[in-house]
Amino acid sequence: MTSGWHESDVPDQHDRTVVVTGANSGLGLRTAVVLASKGARVLLACRSPERGKDALDDVAKAATGPKPELVRLDLSSLDSVQQAAAHIREMTGDALHVLVNNAGVMATPKGRTVDGFETQFGTNHVGHAALTWLLLPALRGAGTTDSPARVVTVSSIAAARGRIDAEDPHFEHRRYDPASAYGQAKLANQVFAMELDARLRAAGEPIISVAAHPGFTATNLTSNMAGSYRNPVIAGALRAGSWVGERVLAQNVRNGTLPQLYAATAEDVTGGDYIGPDGFRQLKGSPTRVKPLRPARDPQTRESLWSVTQRLTGIVPDLS
């Protein structure tokens, strides 16, 4: 993998259809803009129609291929996920080349999705897992042995602080902490990506699953985290730390997007890869392969999360 990979190195994407979740801002918006500028047909899957329309205008200005389109998707609602998946399958004629599971919420106050899941676990992991499973026919329809379709799931360096409790994923019996819940959700993204690829391989599917993380990137998620803490001392310390960190240690959104762009487009990416920055502690740098965390390499942890997610969604993935 070559050091110094940039947006200009993204291969031509004409005749390819891509779905990007959370494409209305930050990493998702930049991903959509770059892929559209390379000729891809980009479907922006966004929760807010208003913010989605603004993003659609930005992506349309950059597009060199088909006009981008908007898909209503609220990952905190399984009904919305099912409707979005059905809409995407209809729009694409069951031919989807890349799904970028990018959207997410970070360190939110304790809460529940409409389906009763802990907000971060339900939105960041369960919603994306359900969407991925429901879009398998479309991914299968576009993938070939020589050019498999791709699922790119975005994790985080915060996953290192996470612990998946399959018996209590919703923090019903343990003390809730916004950062710990975020760590669990982003670790689940990584674990899911690895288990998905293993099952795709076993089933001989023309689809690969990879994961990526943006290192420490200055986005609105980081700056909003302090608001989730009631203790004014903790909240103040987080605001100060975020302010300093984003100006000293963090990279900008354009650079933070590179790992997921690499994962979605680079020709040397293979199933089960985890792409992150090559700099100090993977905080920033050029995209490269990095080692998945131990839970993501553990078959028992992966199987446990897969089973819990099936139970929560009621979806049996078509991976026979």
Image (cartoon, grey):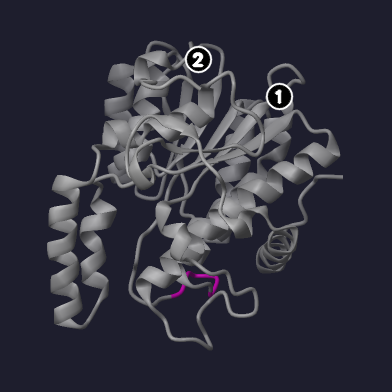
Viewer-nearest residue: 217 or 132:
217
Q: Which residue is mark 1?
A: 143
- Going from N to C along the chain, the mark reached first, 1 or 2, is 2
Magenta stretch, main secondary structure class: loop
- Tell me if 181 is positioned left or right of 140 in this view: left
Residue 175 part of the magenta-drawn span: no
- Residue 137's quadrant in the figure? top right
Vertical arrangement, residue 146 with respect to residue 124, above or below? above
Viewer-nearest residue: 72 or 33:
33
Vertical arrangement, residue 195 with respect to residue 278, above or below? below
Where does residue 270 sit, x and y in percent of width and height? Answer: 65, 29
Which contiguous range is marked in magenta? 112-116
- Quadrant location, the C terminus: top right
Q: Which residue is mark 2?
A: 13
Q: CA distance from mark 1 to mark 2?
A: 14 Å
Viewer-nearest residue: 128 or 54:
128
Q: Is residue 275 visible?
A: yes
For numbered disc 2, what is the local secondary structure?
A: loop
Where does residue 55 sit, x and y in percent of width and height? Answer: 30, 34
Q: Amino acid at mark 2?
A: Gln
Where does residue 297 sit, x and y in percent of width and height? Answer: 66, 53
Vertical arrangement, residue 271 with respect to residue 125, above or below? above
Residue at 47% x, 48% y is 73
- Tell me if 27 is positioned left or right of 297 in this view: left
Q: Outermost residue, bottom direction?
A: 173
Q: Residues within 10 Å of mark 1 (few under 14, many from 20)?
A: many
Residue 115 part of the magenta-drawn span: yes
